[in-house]
Image: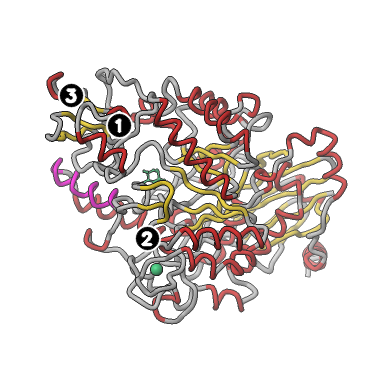
Amino acid sequence: MKTSLLLMILALTINGCKENTNSKQKLAEKGESSRKWWKEAIIYQIYPRSFKDTNGDGVGDLKGITQKLDYIESLGVTAVWLNPIYSSPNDDNGYDVSDYRDIMSDFGTMEDFDHMLSEMHERNIKLVMDVVVNHSSDEHYWFQQSRSSRDNPYRDYYHWWPAEKGEPNYRYSLFDEKGDAWKYDSLTDAYYLHYFSQKQPDLNWENPKVRKEVYDIMHFWAEKGVDGFRLDAFQFVAKDTSFPAIDDDLEKNFIEHYAVQDGLHDYLKEMYEEVFSKYDVMSVAEGAGRNFEDAHNLVDADRKELNMAYAFEGVDIAKPEGYSLKHFKEVFTKWEREFSEKGWLSIFLANHDQARLVSRFGNDSPKYRAPSAKMLNTFILSMRGTPYCYYGDELGMTNGNFETIEDFKDIAAINGYKKVINENGDVDQYLKNLRFSSRDNGRTPMQWSASEHAGFSTGEPWLPVTDNYKTINVVTEETDSSSVLNHFKKMVQLRKSHDVLVYGEYRLLAASHPEVYAFSRELDEKKVLVLLNFSADDAHVELEELSAISDTLINNLDIVDIVENRISLQPYQAIIFSLN
Ligand code: GLC
Ligand code: CA
């Protein structure tokens, strides 16, 4: 046995999950103000419809989440973000809210909510709520009033275009079967605007009454004790309400024309004044604007707007035909560099709008599913920025079994399909893409056990359980020390006990290596080296840093193979070393 290998195996046993008080002191000297609970948070995202059903109707519910809080606590995560749980006709699974102060009947009651929240707090788990206020449901009281007559007091809560002015200029809708964001309503002979589905009319943020309603709603939840807000599609709320013609391919460039338009920062400053400044809550917006300048302006603490925003560039890299690791590294490094001095990032590779992490960014074949899922979780939990881990990814859950269009439930998939037909497009190609990238892939029921319906429900689940649940599930993985789940837990503990993984400076190494993502993190005298093989081949990398290894902090495989400054990594191997 090579001496270096022996050394490494010895080092494995002294796994250093201990608190590093020194680096904490140094950080404090730099300015305590840069330290925030939400920077240190590890957020677990739950899609409530699919997490745990307690009454056998096939739909997850709040009681189910409460029932599984011991499990969530066992993961070590510090906060939960729930997709919308408000009353909704579920055109877009809760992203079409009909009452912002009530709980969706499928999910339970306000009493269930209060109980869930207090049980979370009992376990020191914080709760982040989704706030969906670019639009409401068309079944919301405001919209019912608004559409009823042109002089109704709620008319200006939404964007209406009177038909006598002629057809409004084209606006692109993300979910409409014709791609048209204007819907004609004969009741008042006018069109209303909907960037998403026809049942999601856009609210008019120019109206101070609308903004006041939203702040009141946020107060209602903040007073209950929720710890944070995720602002859905918020970058779209400001609009040029003269609706001028847009001389461009709007469908391709809608971010350019819809995101962070004039007025948005004023709304956020007002929201900060009215809500965020009054509570110890974190705030994160979906979307980081059109460019770095937008992103900075959203999250620069001195501007008093938001704590964080999600940038999509990283999550959008994976394509059905694959992706290049070089590109992946460039994107994450670029964003990291841009926010190294100021502002704070969100780190995620999956959520309810994406297919599964391991199927998109890793390798879901039986041989490589587990190592690649562990490798990706290592990545998410070792970058600077607040990590968001999507339910089921801690198990390495894969894409679901979807074949024909009838198998899909998502409004985006169904209306997208109709749109392709309307436009005489390539239906087979569309379906092929959908099987890989549909949002339904990421919404299948949580795989709790090998029993019927994966232990998610006693009834028929609203979306079928993925057929690999007999091997990929919580019960099986809890008892297997080498499971994706146990690796996830270890990685969470490692991050929580090593400030360097939260606050440390990031440096990309071996930038042009096509298979290995290598980077270091450094905080004062503490330094770690992260090595991730993103490929299904053995890979080698030479790094000076390898001569300074003091300890192996985590390794998803049993081997460490180093000769001098050269390490050989197995397919999808992920290792973090601490360095002298
Ligand atoms: C956001 C949500 C998505 C939803 C859309 C409309 O993008 O993440 O799930 O469909 O907004 O609310
Ligand atoms: Ca239920």
Q: Look at label 3 and name its amino acid.
A: Pro
Q: In which quarter of the image is residue 158?
A: top left
Residue in the picture at 53% in, 43% down = 229
| Residue that label 2 marks | 105
What secondary structure is the stretch in magenta mostly built from? helix
Residue 354: image location, x then y, percent: 41, 51
Q: Is residue 256 magenta?
A: no
- The region drawn magenta spans 411-424
Q: Look at label 1 and name its amino acid.
A: Tyr
Secondary structure category for the residue under label 2: loop
Q: Is residue 419 magenta?
A: yes
- Check disc 2: other Cα within 10 Å, few if <14, some if 14-19, many if 20+: some
Q: Quadrant of ligand 1?
A: top left
| Residue that label 1 marks | 154
Residue 405: image location, x then y, percent: 22, 58
Q: Quadrant of residue 18?
A: bottom right
Q: In the visual, does 289 lie left or right of 513?
A: left
Mark 2 or mark 1: name the one nearer the start of the chain: 2
